[in-house]
């Protein structure tokens, strides 16, 4: 039905006219009705001032008090607008019955209903609320003696006058609406004839351009918007041919970018100017939109130039590694062509910082493992060779033999612990799939550990205390691994706290987490070592750690176990003041919920 623009324009004009007239009519009727309501309320409020109400109340209790009130209000009948449509009544304040009225219509006085305003006046309040949905307006003024309402002055307007005016306004609106529709249809027809005819002509001729006839031009017959549209079509025809060639070139460029894309991507023209750059490249190179840089300025440290890439290594790639903002970035250079000619260079950036860190970490790990195993192996070998020499000479004492075997056994145990810790770390790195979980009493677990280590603390002349802050819930965990973590932390606290020192273990339940703190007043950890304390084989005091039988993996294992339980572990320490280790474990880890 509305496929034709003529019908759309006609419908638009008609709907617009109807909408405007209805809107104006609604506004006029609402405004008029509101005006009558406000005026009625204003007149009554002015007449029945507080002073006048007090004057009326002063008549209560006198002889013929109702008549006195009636006579007083009658004096204001003109100001109140009392007529055949607006009446005034004197009502009994207790029953609401009419005592006197300023109208000759007795039936109207007898048929008064208890309106909300009358009820409000009987309650001692001025009833002044206007209900627009009612077919009348009313105003009730209570006349009281103390807290008792004796009479009510009640004004009631039938709204006949305002309704007559509103009916007249509505009639005028209907007439204006019909006239407006006729005028809008006439204007719509004239506008459609003016616009549709040139558009149809333009459509027929533009179809030839759409079919590929770029040489065809359209005659411009008018200087208005239609003429401007025609000129735009002519310009489009001339530009379209050029654009098609450019699109083909851009297609090849985009294909090259897609083929080499990793993270950041830049494209440079033959003169080294930037023609494309993506957000990742800006972030990696720390560039902003205002930076106007070329190839040489960005990659001067790579020892390559744009000519070398375009003309000596066609469709090959050159790789360089640069350091920007503390990041290791691998840079790939590749040329691209446009219309069988060199078009420029594509540069692909890949952030390899984490890969380099991982490679470095692996090399350090292998070196540390080799070093840790070499020391006990050397000791075992040297003591074994010495024993062999003594046995062959037949000159060996039992005490020496026993001492040598003890050292060999100790070093073997050290290697066993190291291998065991390495296997545990490997399991944790692989997700620790063999770690069974269940609900366990963490309070019982921690207190048991403290009780077992009490003997070690007593031997070192140290005090070891356990102080649960509040009631601890059962937590979902692997008790053996949590026990291993807490034991390791308490053991470290005892080892590095001098005789006479104090180690305090506390536990607290807050929200959905249980926090275990181990605090000592020992030798502490230097600030420079704190950030490395959870690294594998990292020791603050290497000589003392080895002397005490440590492998350098305890805290690394503790961190892996806690994180496997979706918890956190942190250390705060000051040299010669003490160390505090805080383990935070969720009561019910999300990944272990059924």
Image: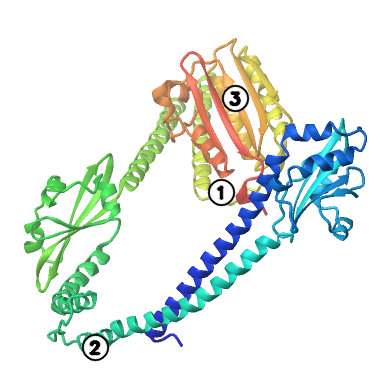
Q: Nearer the viewer, mark 2 or mark 1?
A: 2
Q: Are marks 2 and 3 in contact (CB under 8 Å)?
A: no
**Which residue is depicted at the point 58% across and 32% down?**
583
Which secondary structure, mark 2? Answer: helix
Q: Which residue is mark 2?
A: 201
Q: Is residue 357 above or below residue 224?
A: above
Task: Give the crowd class for mark 2: few <14, some 14-19, many >=20 residues within 10 Å.
Answer: few
Q: Nearer the viewer, mark 2 or mark 3?
A: 2
> As drawn, is 456 to the left or to the right of 214?
right
Most extreme residue toward the top, as rendered? 500
**Which residue is depicted at the point 62% across and 11% down?**
461
For marks 3 and 1, the one nearer the N-term is: 1
| Residue 185 lies in quadrant | bottom left
**Which residue is depicted at the point 85% across and 53% down?**
114
- State the CA–CA distance, disc 2 to disc 1: 77 Å
Q: Which residue is mark 1?
A: 432
Question: Residue 518: which disc?
Answer: 3
């Amino acid at each position: 039905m509305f496929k034709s623009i003529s019908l759309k324009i006609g419908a638009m004009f008609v709907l617009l006219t109807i909408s405007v007239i209805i809107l104006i009519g609604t506004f006029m009727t609402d405004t008029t009705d509101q005006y009558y309501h406000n005026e009625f309320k204003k007149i009554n409020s002015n007449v029945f001032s507080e002073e006048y109400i007090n004057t009326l109340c002063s008549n209560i209790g006198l002889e013929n008090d109702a008549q006195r009130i009636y006579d007083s209000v009658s004096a204001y009948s003109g100001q109140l607008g009392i007529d055949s449509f607006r009446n005034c009544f004197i009502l009994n304040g207790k029953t609401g019955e009419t005592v006197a009225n300023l109208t000759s219509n007795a039936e109207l006085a007898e048929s008064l209903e208890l309106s909300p305003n009358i009820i409000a006046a009987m309650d001692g309040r001025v009833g002044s609320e206007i209900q627009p949905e009612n077919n009348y307006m009313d105003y009730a003024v209570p006349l009281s003696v103390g807290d008792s309402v004796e009479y009510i002055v009640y004004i009631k307007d039938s709204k006949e006058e305002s309704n007559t005016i509103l009916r007249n306004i509505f009639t005028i609106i209907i007439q204006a609406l019909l006239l407006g529709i006729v005028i809008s249809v006439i204007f719509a027809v004239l506008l459609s004839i003016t616009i549709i005819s040139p558009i149809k002509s333009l459509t027929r001729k533009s179809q030839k351009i759409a079919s590929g006839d770029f040489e065809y031009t359209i005659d411009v017959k008018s200087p208005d918007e239609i003429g401007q549209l025609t000129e735009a079509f002519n310009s489009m025809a001339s530009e379209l041919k050029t654009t098609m060639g450019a699109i083909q070139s851009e297609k090849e460029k985009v294909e090259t970018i897609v083929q080499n894309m990793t993270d950041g991507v830049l494209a440079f023209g033959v003169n080294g100017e930037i023609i494309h750059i993506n957000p990742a490249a800006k972030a990696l190179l720390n560039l902003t939109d205002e930076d106007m840089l070329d190839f040489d300025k960005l990659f001067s440290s790579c020892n390559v130039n744009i000519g070398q890439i375009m003309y000596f290594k066609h469709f090959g790639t050159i790789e360089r590694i640069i350091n920007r903002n503390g990041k290791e970035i691998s840079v790939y250079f590749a040329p691209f062509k446009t219309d069988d000619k060199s078009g420029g260079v594509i540069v692909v950036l890949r952030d390899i910082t984490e890969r380099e860190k991982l490679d470095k970490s692996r090399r350090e790990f292998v070196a540390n493992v080799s070093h840790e195993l070499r020391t006990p192996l050397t000791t075992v070998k040297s003591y074994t060779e010495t024993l062999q020499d003594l046995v062959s000479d037949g000159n060996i004492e039992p005490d020496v033999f026993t001492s040598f075997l003890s050292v060999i056994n100790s070093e073997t145990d050290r290697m066993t612990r190291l291998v065991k810790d390495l296997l545990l770390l490997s399991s944790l790195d692989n997700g620790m799939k063999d770690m069974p979980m269940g609900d366990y009493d963490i309070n019982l677990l921690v207190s048991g550990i403290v009780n077992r280590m009490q003997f070690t603390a007593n031997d070192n002349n140290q005090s070891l205390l356990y102080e649960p802050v509040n009631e601890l819930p059962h937590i979902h965990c692997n008790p053996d691994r949590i026990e291993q973590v807490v034991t390791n932390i308490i053991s470290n606290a005892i080892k590095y706290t001098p005789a006479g020192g104090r180690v305090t273990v506390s536990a607290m339940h807050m929200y959905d987490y249980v926090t275990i703190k181990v605090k000592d007043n020992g030798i502490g950890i230097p600030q420079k070592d704190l950030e490395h304390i959870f690294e594998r084989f990292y020791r603050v005091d290497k000589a003392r750690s080895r002397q005490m039988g440590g492998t350098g993996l305890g805290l690394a294992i503790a961190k892996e176990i806690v994180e496997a339980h979706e918890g956190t572990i942190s250390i705060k320490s000051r040299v010669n003041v003490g160390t505090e280790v805080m383990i935070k474990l969720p009561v019910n880890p999300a990944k272990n919920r059924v």
